Amino acid sequence: MAASSPAPTARRAGLSRAQIVAKAQELSATAGLEGWSMRDIAQALTVTPSVLYHYFRNKEDLSDAVVDAVVATVPLPDPALEWKDWFTRLLFAARPALLACPGVADRLMTGHLTARTIPLAEATAAQLQRAGFGPLAPLAGSLIFNSALAALAAHHGRRRQWAHGHYATQRTHLLALADQSPAIAQLVTHFFPADQSPAALAEASLDYYQLLIAALLDGVEHVLLPLAAAAPPAAGP
């Protein structure tokens, strides 16, 4: 007789918060942070759902812990760096960590911050103040992070489409339109190359992200810094 899977138990010796978070990250890697339930986590750990509530109040609490775990893997750059270099290094280091756990970028982008993100927020504010953004520092930070996070969040959707063959379907559709439109033909050339291998698509995605970050930081520098310099001093208390 074949061995059956162990039945879920109401208790599990040795279970810890870290193990639960690791399992949530594992499920998020394929289903996304919003793609699992507490029941799914319990089933994967062969415990009853009630066991998880000894460690986490609800899924929101566990999702915050996943965000904390991912953010903890992204080191803060040397604060002595020039501000654009500092953000470039930070956002390049954050990319693989956030892509490995789809849904975390979306959560951060919509303001689901945790205590673990406080050092990042403080370091960001210090960089922008030192660069001269003054009262516009929060706006500059929002533009930088939301743009980068949106690009990473969108990558998850594209990756799912690639896995289901939608890339080839979309390319065929656009090639038909390209016969009537030089502009669309250029889009196909730049964003839908014939080489559809995972390695080629990953390389193109990385190149796009790097260009996005460079253009974003230059834009913030050339648009917001002059506005900050012209802004009246903040009124005292």
Image (cartoon, rainbow, N blue to C red):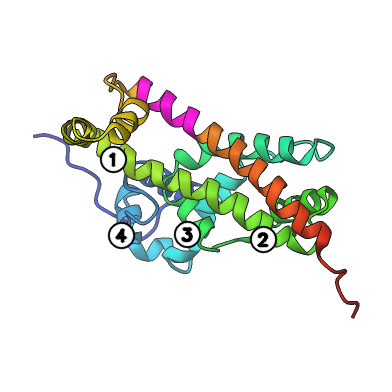
Q: Which residue is mark 2?
A: 139
The quarter of the picture where residue 34 lies is: bottom left
Q: Nearer the viewer, mark 1 or mark 3?
A: 1
The three-letter code of the residue at mark 1 reads Arg
Q: Which contiguous range is marked in magenta?
A: 199-208
For image coordinates 81% across by 48% down, the residue present is 131
Spatial distance from mark 1 to mark 3, Cα to Cα?
24 Å
Spatial distance from mark 4 to mark 1, Cα to Cα?
24 Å
Q: Nearer the viewer, mark 2 or mark 4?
A: 2
**Residue 235 vs residue 227: left or right?**
right
Q: Which residue is mark 4?
A: 39
Q: Judging from the image, what secondary structure is the residue with disc 4 in?
A: helix
Q: Between disc 4 and disc 1, whose residue precedes?
A: 4
Q: How many other residues sit within 10 Å of disc 2, few (<14), some (14-19) or many (≥20)?
A: few
The three-letter code of the residue at mark 2 reads Leu
In the rendered image, residue 226, in percent from the top left (x then y), is placed at: 77, 53
Asked whether residue 164 is in view, the answer is: no
